[in-house]
Amino acid sequence: MSRRRSSTTRWIRGGRTRCDSPTTSSTRWPRRSPRPSRAPDPREPAGSRQSSPERSFNSPLGKNAPRRCVALDVGLLLIRLVVGLLLVGHGTQKLFGWFGGGGPEGTGGFFASLGYPAARSMAVLAGATEAGAGALLAIGLATPLAAAGIIGVMLNAIVAAHLKNGLWVTKGGIEYPLVLATVAFGLAWIGPGAYSIDRAIGWYPARPVAGLGALGLGVAGALVILATRRPAAAQPQQQPQETQKRPGRAA
């Protein structure tokens, strides 16, 4: 093998900066140093080559690594807050009827139209999962478990309610729940970032194992709930009140 190595190889095998380090954003991976192009000088103090100032910037992120890591963590925080709080809102719509939601009764009627048994209980379960997982995602606590809950609920929504309508949300398709499930999986895969409770308490699961675990748990939960559906026994969905004919209007 040639002694000449690419810069990418040197980055990987050298002191690469790691944005998701539990300690600081500029922590290096002090593993094996790149193969020297010349024989080391016996008079040179041991370890002096690795301690040179240039080594601290031997990373794909360059000299601005700490700044870029902060930008990444802020971006992850914004994604978590927006997606998590939206899911909290959806959950409270089902649980309490807030924000124009139907509450357990109204949402239960919709679930019954999709063929779910014990539709009111299913509505409460879906609302509690959305609100709880959304809150955990927003604060960055137990992020893989929160992602698994979101993935499970969104897969149920995709299969039971939206798949027959195609992709785009304008026609009632799978676009919106697909985006939420994908974001949840992505956050479980790469982690919640520095501004999270998971980081503060030192809970730092290995990735991508955490992402794959969240995906597997979410899919398994969705399959269990979907297996209870009886679409043939689904009730006709009630017409929205605002589209019903008003008394006295000609047919």
Image (cartoon, helix red, strand yellow):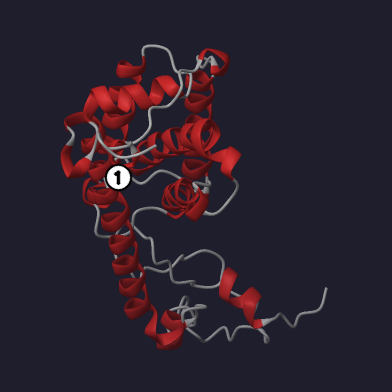
- Judge whether 35 appears above or below 22 on screen: below
| Relative to 74, 10 lies left or right | right
Q: Residues within 10 Å of mark 1 (few under 14, many from 20)?
A: many
The residue at the point 55 percent across, 33 percent down is 159
Q: Residue at x 71, y 80 (%)?
A: 5
In the visual, does 37 lie left or right of 223?
right
Q: Position of residue 17 (x, y in %)?
A: 44, 71
x and y percentages locating residue 41 in the rendered image? 58, 86
Residue type at mark 1? Leu
Q: Is residue 235 left or right of residue 223?
A: left
Say whether residue 193 is left or right of residue 173: left
Which image quarter: residue 203? top left
- Relative depth, front residue between 143 and 219: 219
Task: Give the total of numbered labels.
Answer: 1
Name the secondary structure under disc 1.
helix
Q: Which residue is mark 1?
A: 87
Quadrant of the snapshot with the N terminus: bottom right
